[in-house]
Amino acid sequence: MDEVIPLQQQAIRLSPRDPRIGWWYLLIGTVHLLQSRTDEAIVWLEKARSAMPAVPSLHSFLASAYALNGEIERAAAELAEARRWRGDLFSSIAHLKARRWTSWAPKTRALFQATYLVGLRKAGMPEE
């Protein structure tokens, strides 16, 4: 995971107009979120949102980061936006885990449990 941010930043420097730049921002923001650097995560996730506003998972990551940062109203708004695009996926923690977590390595799942899911709970996502 430590290699993700420098590689994405290099891609951004080499190709600042690349149509995939939003995904690079999203990866950087996600790593910051998983490493509990919520202020940095928010900066990068907001850049990603500007580049690709129709990506539901991006809104869920931003909701989690805002909630972890104590910005519950903003978190709830982002969670609502994720649900607007993919309500089925973001209806509950249990549903999200069932759809997304089956193939992840245990260490990755643990990081998501400790950050992303904690933030989504604070943003208002129910367990079931």
Image: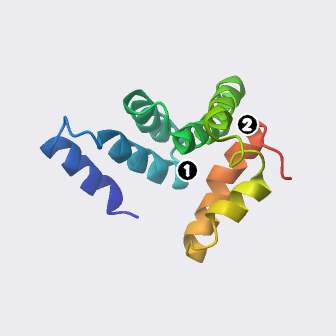
Give the mark toward the camera: 2 or 1.
2
27 vs 106, left or right, is: left
106 vs 124, left or right, is: left
Residue 97 x %, y % = 70, 61
Which numbered disc, 2 or 1, marks the residue that appears first in the sequence?
A: 1
Q: Quadrant of the N terminus?
A: bottom left
Task: Between residue 115 and residue 12, name the one nearer to us.
Answer: 12
Helix, strand or loop status at disc 2: helix
Residue 123's tag is 2
Task: Between residue 62 and residue 71, name the one nearer to us.
Answer: 62
* Residue under the image location 55 percent in, 68 percent down: 108
Task: Between residue 42 and residue 85, name the one nearer to us.
Answer: 85
* Residue under the image location 63 percent in, 51 percent down: 116
Q: Amino acid at mark 1?
A: Ser
Please rate how many residues cluster around mark 2, counting C-alpha atoms within 10 Å: few if below 14, some from 14 to 19, many from 20.
many
Query: Which corner quadrant of the image does residue 47 belong to?
Result: top left
* Residue under the image location 78 percent in, 58 percent down: 94
Helix, strand or loop status at disc 1: loop
* Residue under the image location 28 percent in, 51 percent down: 8
Q: Amino acid at mark 2?
A: Ala
Query: Which corner quadrant of the image does residue 70 belong to?
Result: top right
- Disc 1 designates what residue? 36
